[in-house]
Image (cartoon, rainbow, N blue to C red):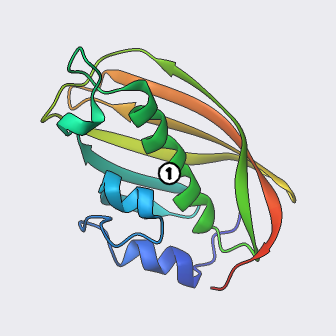
């Protein structure tokens, strides 16, 4: 892993405590998390569970939980400062606890192994009580799309 700052990581560091409504990801803007921590290979954000993020039982929809983790992991990989964009190859998720409307959950995205073409990451969503709501593992692969700093 690289500990040198880069403009993309600096972008997230400058937004700690701010919401992600201005994210470069339109879906990330809709999710509208608040960045709590940014470091090379790690991004943490809080999300308020809104009614449109729930299933008929009134708890966080599995798709919305997956989206939170996938989008946060994507933002974290973007912050690594690589020359090319990365995209998910797979994402395996376990749902372990419920989150209800109005609850604030904390999502964490971390690099586990950073290879030349494949980056393996893990993510977690925790309730304010510390209970694990969901956890995932994912692999992202380098694309041929160059991205600017």
Q: Position of residue 33 (x, y in %)?
A: 30, 54
Q: Is residue 21 left or right of residue 146?
A: left
Where, by quadrant of the figure, is residue 145 drawn? bottom right
Q: Which image quadrant: the N terminus? A: bottom right
In the displayed structure, 29 sits above or below 113; it is below
Q: Position of residue 4 (x, y in %)?
A: 63, 77
Q: Is residue 96 left or right of residue 17?
A: right
Q: Position of residue 144 (x, y in %)?
A: 85, 69
At 66% from the left edge and 85% from the top edge, which residue is drawn? 148
In the displayed structure, 118 sits above or below 142; it is above
Q: Is residue 83 visible?
A: yes
Q: Position of residue 51 (x, y in %)?
A: 18, 35
At 70% from the left edge and 79% from the top edge, which residue is drawn? 147
Q: Is residue 69 left or right of residue 46?
A: right
At 28% from the left edge and 48% from the top edge, which residue is drawn? 46
Residue beneath disc 1? 71
In the displayed structure, 38 sits above or below 11; it is above
Q: Secondary structure at mark 1?
A: helix
At 15% from the left edge and 31% from the top edge, which residue is drawn? 101
Where, by quadrant of the figure, is residue 127 drawn? top left
Residue extending furthest left?
Answer: 102
Q: Is residue 49 visible?
A: no
Q: Which image quadrant: the C terminus? A: bottom right
């Amino acid at each position: 892993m690289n500990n040198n700052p880069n403009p993309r990581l600096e972008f997230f560091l400058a937004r700690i405590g701010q919401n992600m409504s201005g994210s470069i990801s339109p879906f990330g803007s809709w999710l509208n998390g608040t960045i709590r921590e940014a470091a090379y290979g790690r991004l943490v954000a809080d999300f308020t569970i809104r009614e449109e993020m729930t299933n008929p039982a009134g708890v966080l929809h599995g798709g919305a939980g997956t989206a939170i983790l996938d989008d946060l992991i994507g933002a974290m990989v973007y912050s690594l400062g690589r020359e090319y964009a990365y995209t998910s190859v797979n994402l395996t998720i376990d749902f372990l606890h419920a989150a209800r409307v109005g609850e604030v959950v904390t999502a964490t995205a971390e690099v586990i192994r950073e290879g030349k073409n494949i980056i393996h990451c893990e993510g977690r969503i925790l309730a304010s009580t510390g209970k694990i709501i969901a956890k995932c593992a994912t692999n992202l692969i380098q694309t041929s799309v160059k991205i600017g700093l």
